[in-house]
Amino acid sequence: MAFDAVAAAQARGSDLLLIDTAGRLHTQKHLRDELSKVFATIGKKMPGAPHRVLLVLDATTGQNALSQARLFSGAIRIDGIILTKLDGTAKGGIVLAIAQELMIPVVFIGTGEGVDDLRPFDAGEFVDGILGQLMERVETA
């Protein structure tokens, strides 16, 4: 399917093609191996592709997000992270562990379910948010 999608995009002169491989559990090695095959197949049809690979992680999973990033980055190149569900109780502190250990930048965050709720990641704003929450806890203690 990925090969055909690239061929169709090329035939139409498209500037952008998104290939969504959602639903793959990081704990299933055969699905991670399949991702490597998809990656190679895309590259055969269009040398240098895929040009950008983003891993979507759920901020509410905590340390499990680091495990996911670690295992998926072992299977394919990951250029950036989209961290979702930052609109609830999730603090997203796992961003720091992923950045430190894997050197993968967070490029977008999701703070809701609408298309306008996906926005570029701003590290300063993120740190201010975490520190602000910490200070609120200290002041009420």
Image (spheres, rainbow, N blue to C red):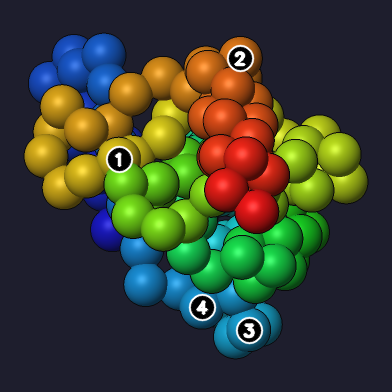
Q: Amino acid at mark 2?
A: Gly
Question: How far apart are the two marked residues, 3 and 2, measured between alpha carbons?
Answer: 33 Å
Residue at the image position 18 percent from the left and 14 percent from the top: 13
Label 3 SS: loop
Left or right of residue 45: residue 78: right
Residue 119, given in percent of the width and then of the height, sits at 33, 24
The answer to whether residue 31 is above or below residue 60 is below
Residue at the spot of label 3 = 27
Q: Are marks 2 and 4 in contact (CB under 8 Å)?
A: no
> Which residue position is annotated with label 4?
25
Dot 4 falls on a residue whose secondary structure is loop
Q: Amino acid at mark 1?
A: Thr
Residue placed under numbered mark 2 in the picture: 124
Q: Name the front one of labels 3 and 2.
A: 2
Kind of residue sitting beneath label 4: Leu
Q: Looking at the image, do the residues carrying marks 2 and 1 touch, with CB atoms under 8 Å apart?
A: no
Measured Cα–Cα span from mark 1 to mark 3: 26 Å
